Image (tube, rainbow, N blue to C red):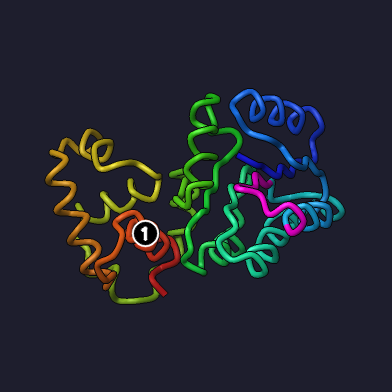
Amino acid sequence: MRVVLAEDLYLLREGLVRLLEAHDCTVVAAVETGPDLLDALLRHRPDVAVVDVRLPPTNTDEGLQAALTARRQVPGLPVLVLSQHVEQLYARELLADGTGGIGYLLKDRVFNADQFLDAVRRVAGGGTAMDPEVIAKLLQQPARNVPLARLTPREREVLELMAEGRSNAAIGQRLFLSESAVGKHTASIFGKLDLAPSDDDNRRVLAVLAYLNGAT
């Protein structure tokens, strides 16, 4: 798996490079500024980018801005944001194209290597990996369309866990439901969000993106 990494803190950047390369990843570029990130993403077109939000030169939102620009030029480019901050506006924009391959983890809530590497692989595969606190922040603004209002409270619970990247089996364990019951809730969610029958993995991504974007 080819990875572009953007992190301005030297020790963290080098630590992430060593972690990734110890688990069958090739870090094709490890950069520390927004302009260097954009250049690396467009030049290497990696399997996944691991990106901090706040990078030099201004340490505001250069990481997300570079990721957004790159995804406009390379649609579907997988991006995993790894940050101490939730930037609601740009996070929503990053999710808005509906193509998947998006993750957003908070640094202080990544508790072990397996959790991080699972998120990297999931995003590289076109899925989503969202920290629950990020989801909560993104949902502070009310939904702007009717379809989400159609969901029952239980369906919203299922969809929120789906947004975290959990499988039907894992959702069932969390909610004390059988896997078949979760499957029925999932099918109902797809119908209520007007997602036509297609590959189930793709519909999961579209349902999660609709949920996180307020179903625009």
Residue furthest out toward the right: 57
Front residue of 216 and 36: 36
Q: Vertically, is 54 above or below 202?
A: above
Q: Relative to residue 140, is residue 20 drawn left or right? A: right
Q: Vertically, is 29 above or below 95?
A: above
**Residue 172: quarter of image:** top left
Q: Amino acid at mark 1?
A: Asn
Span shown in magenta: 42-51
Q: Position of residue 75 (x, y in %)?
A: 59, 66
Kindly identify which residue carries mark 1. Answer: 202
Q: Position of residue 98 (x, y in %)?
A: 46, 66
Decide: few, some or many residues near mark 1? Use Cα within 10 Å; few <14, some 14-19, many ≥20. Answer: some
Residue occupying image coordinates x 61% and y 36%: 107
Residue occupying image coordinates x 50% and y 49%: 134
Front residue of 197 and 143: 197
Q: Secondary structure at mark 1?
A: helix
Residue 47 magenta-highlighted: yes
Q: Relative to residue 183, is residue 85 drawn left or right? A: right
